[in-house]
Image (cartoon, helix red, strand yellow):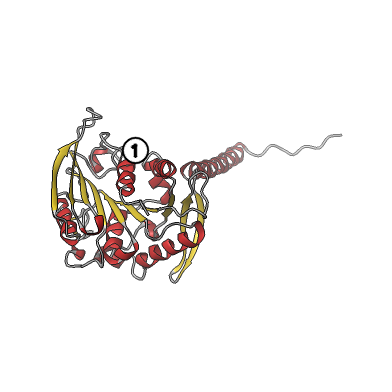
Amino acid sequence: MTWSLPDPPLRKRWWWRLVVVGLGLLALGAILLVAWQAWCTRGLSKHSLRTPGGDRTFYVHLPPGHSTAKSVPLVIALHGNGGTAAQLNRATRYGLTRQADAHGWVLVIPQGISKSWNDHRPFKERALGGVDDVGFLTQLIDYAQASYGIDPERVFILGASNGGAMALTLAVERSERVRAVAAVVMSLPEIHEHAAPKRAVSVLMVNGTKDPIVPYVGGQILGARGRVLSTPASLDWWARQNGCATVVPPRQLPDADPSDGTRVWYESREGCAGGTIAALYRVEGGGHTWPGGRPYAPERLVGRVSGDIDASRVVFDFFALHAKP
């Protein structure tokens, strides 16, 4: 004799099938999410640092053959508002890890609280009250020195958008801890206009003239997120702070990608204190995007991506000018 259960009513069978399909889709989504995160963070190891404000997350990439016996430069890369450390590396087409390997430097990509950085603009102070990112990044430099043997006199900070504002804030408020910084699609926040850094710091900006979020001509950032100096005024501000004596006029770079609708000009202020430089890549027609990187939003929202330069390469090359011990 065999035993069997009676078939459930047709309506119940369909309901059960929907449940099974739904659970299967959830499981598949979870698997794909894990795989996507692993893909974005390849070459990066995840770490945690205990700070006065709580535990903070960051990722580390060590170049091949790295040894703490050899003191090397440190690069800290800061993502933009709403982004993540993993997304930043992917958005640069993994240019950050590739350049770190090419130069043999230690790369650290920290994660901001609520995917953001408190660069002391009033907008950020309201949103991130109590978050001390200047303190966190300073502590992270100390950690990297103790853990990876980096040279504390060769610390470089780069950032995109909000991360660029954070890099510039660190150059203003902790100039004694950094040798050079680079801000992509960001100029100097007005709140720092009357500040006086303790020492000269080399600064590079990579800004698009058609940026719909951070205006190249200065003024209000989109969405009442504070005000910035114009990009030319920001360049002049750093030149004054660094005591630069020479104006190197703009020169147009080759049109490497004629189809992108952009052209790039480079200019600098040199003969500055301590061998520092203030420099700018002006991306004519460029938007709120990483040159040479992946589009992260529709062009109608963020503007064009320039293919004439690779921002990862030019930033690391700029840092390399200051990498001698």
Q: Which amino acid type corresponds to the residue marked 1 in the rendered image?
A: Arg
Dividing the picture into quarters, in which one does residue 174 lie? bottom left
Extreme residue toward the right, this view:
1
Of residue 90 and residue 18, the one placed in the foreground of this image is 90
Residue under numbered circle 1: 294
Q: Secondary structure at mark 1?
A: loop
Instruction: Answer above or below: position of 155 versus 4.
Output: below
Point out the image quarter for the C terminus.
bottom left
Where's residue 242, x and y in %? 20, 59
Q: Which residue lies at the image location 37% right of the left edge and 51% below the top edge? A: 83
Q: Is residue 71 visible?
A: yes
Of residue 161 and residue 248, the one placed in the foreground of this image is 248
Where's residue 229, x and y in %? 16, 57
Instruction: Answer above or below: position of 109 versus 124.
Output: above
Q: How many marks?
A: 1
Of residue 132 and residue 222, the one placed in the foreground of this image is 132
Q: Is residue 219 visible?
A: no
Where's residue 176, x and y in %? 31, 65
Extreme residue toward the front, this view:
325
Q: Residues within 10 Å of mark 1 (few under 14, many from 20)?
A: some
Where's residue 136, x and y in %? 40, 65
Instruction: Answer above or below: position of 99 versus 234.
Output: above
Point out the image quarter for the N terminus.
top right
